Image: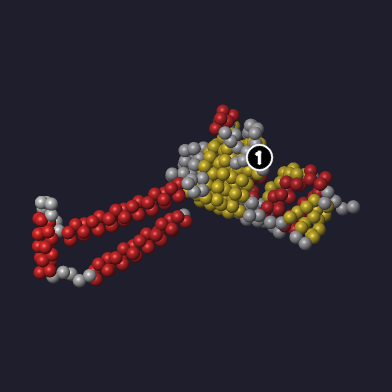
Amino acid sequence: MPNKGKNSDSKKDFQNHSDKVWNILDAVPECSEDFEEKILASSTEREMQSSGRSGSFSWVYRAAAAIFLLFGIGLLYFITQDDVTDITFIEYESVLYNTERGERKELHISDHIYVQLNAETDLKIMPHKDKMAPRLVYLRGEAYFNVSDTPAGFEVKTDAGVVQVIGTAFNIRAREDEVDVVVESGLVSIRGLSYEDIDTAVQVPAGHRSVKHKNSPALEPVPIDIKKFLSWRTGEFVFEQTPLSDVIVNLERAYNVRIDLQDRNLDDIRVTGEFGQEPLMQILNEICWSANLRYRQEEDVYILYKPD
């Protein structure tokens, strides 16, 4: 954490100043025994004459005690204030991870929570007093989670709903006002953004998928082919009667390119096929061949069109 570094530097500065003070004190010559006796005798005599009070400590000892008391209080205050600031900063700071187009990222946000981010994704980890086991993350984009020994109350919040984790491996695609959840193992539940929506939560078991739109209940889970939805993790694509417009969006994110359709009527063309980590142009060639299309490149833009 940035604040930890700041506190560490402050403590070092304080230690350096303290060392200088002690060096100065060490350089002061010690008083001779005769001089000490004269000082003590003089101070004792003055004490006996003042207000009829007598004291057993000389002004030398009193001054020394006062100096060390002030020094000790200052040191305690400094250290206490430093630690409190540090703890407060940690408890209330969120951590943001993100990926750009053409980028994937793996995260171990605790010993029990592994996350893989797909391209163009934001993941914000919200603070909690148990920093080794975060309770809430915000997701915008797509991410795969593998959660073991689930922290109580761990949730993934999106713009369209909340996914309650019950110890599992699952994939969430949260884009715009829709959240799409696929469960590889274990069990999750999906509900609305408000805790009042908990009665409408839908449980999604392993091998099933559920979709929820903002301000609407989650759909009942349906069995699916997990491979199709998790292929992005290895840089692959599995399309099954997928609209060409959706295929293009996936390719743009994965390859960090722009792909346009010359005619918007081509949006609804369905694409079926599996593609590995081959070059983009090879994938476009295969898609165009199967859909009777052509493509051309104009500067940095690939344009798909229907031949005359």
Above or below — where is 152 with respect to 83? above
Task: Give 58 or 278, whichever is nearer the viewer.
Answer: 58
Q: Circle 1 sits on which residue?
A: 178
Image coordinates of residue 175 in percent, x first then y, are: 65, 44
Task: Give 69 or 308, whichever is nearer the viewer.
Answer: 69
Q: Residue sitting at 35 percent across and 51 percent down?
A: 80
Q: Residue sitting at 64 percent across and 48 percent down?
A: 231
Task: Give 111 or 8, whichever is nearer the viewer.
Answer: 8
Name the residue type under label 1.
Answer: Glu
Query: Circle 1 — which element?
Result: strand
Q: Residue sitting at 12 percent across and 69 percent down?
A: 35
Q: Residue sitting at 71 percent across and 53 percent down?
A: 252
Residue 106 visible at all: yes
Image coordinates of residue 92 in percent, x first then y, are: 47, 46
Q: Mark 1: few, some, or many residues within 10 Å (few <14, many ≥20)?
A: some
Image coordinates of residue 236 in percent, x first then y, are: 66, 52
Residue 182 horizontal side relative to residue 125, left or right: right
Applied colour scheme: secondary structure
Residue 274 visible at all: no
Q: How many marks?
A: 1
Above or below — where is 165 with respect to 7? above
Instruction: Using the rendered view, name the quadrant where residue 179 is placed.
Output: top right
Task: Give 191 or 64, whichever is nearer the viewer.
Answer: 64
In the current view of this chain or complex, which residue is farthest to the right? 308
Image coordinates of residue 164 in percent, x first then y, are: 54, 37
Above or below — where is 200 with respect to 63? above
